[in-house]
Image (cartoon, rainbow, N blue to C red):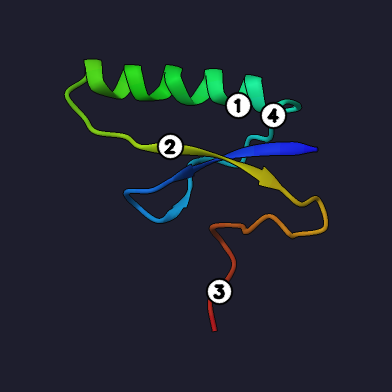
Amino acid sequence: MAWRLYDTINGDWYDDELYDTQEACTEAAHFYMREAEEMGDNLELLVEPFDPSELLESPFEEED
């Protein structure tokens, strides 16, 4: 199963990177949140499973 990071503040996926394990995704979330805190920002990330049958949204796609 693949895992992704969800940004709860912005209500969107944090990035398009997929992680092989929940543990790797959790480590990445902690890294990014610590990095943001050191820069004076607030970042809240959730580790969420990703269904490979879902299409990755492109920022260039038009919304209807």
Of mark 4 and mark 1, the one earlier in the sequence is: 4
- Which amino acid, by three-letter code, is at mark 1? Cys
- Which amino acid, by three-letter code, is at mark 4? Tyr
Above or below for 45 versus 9:
above
Give the distance between the C-alpha atoms of the residues marked 4 and 1, in whole angstroms.
Answer: 6 Å
Of mark 2 and mark 3, the one earlier in the sequence is: 2
- Which amino acid, by three-letter code, is at mark 2? Leu
Q: Which residue is mark 1?
A: 25
The quadrant of the picture occupied by the C terminus is bottom right
In the displayed structure, does residue 15 sit left or right of residue 36?
A: right
Q: Position of residue 41 (x, y in %)?
A: 21, 30
Residue at 24% across / 21% down in the picture? 37
At mark 1, the secondary structure is helix
Q: Position of residue 32 (x, y in %)?
A: 41, 23
Above or below for 7 versus 39:
below
Q: Which residue is mark 3?
A: 62
At mark 2, the secondary structure is strand
Which residue is at the front of the view, 18 or 48? 48
The quadrant of the picture occupied by the N terminus is top right
Above or below for 50 versus 24:
below
**Is the residue under label 2 in contact with that under label 1 (CB below 8 Å)?**
no
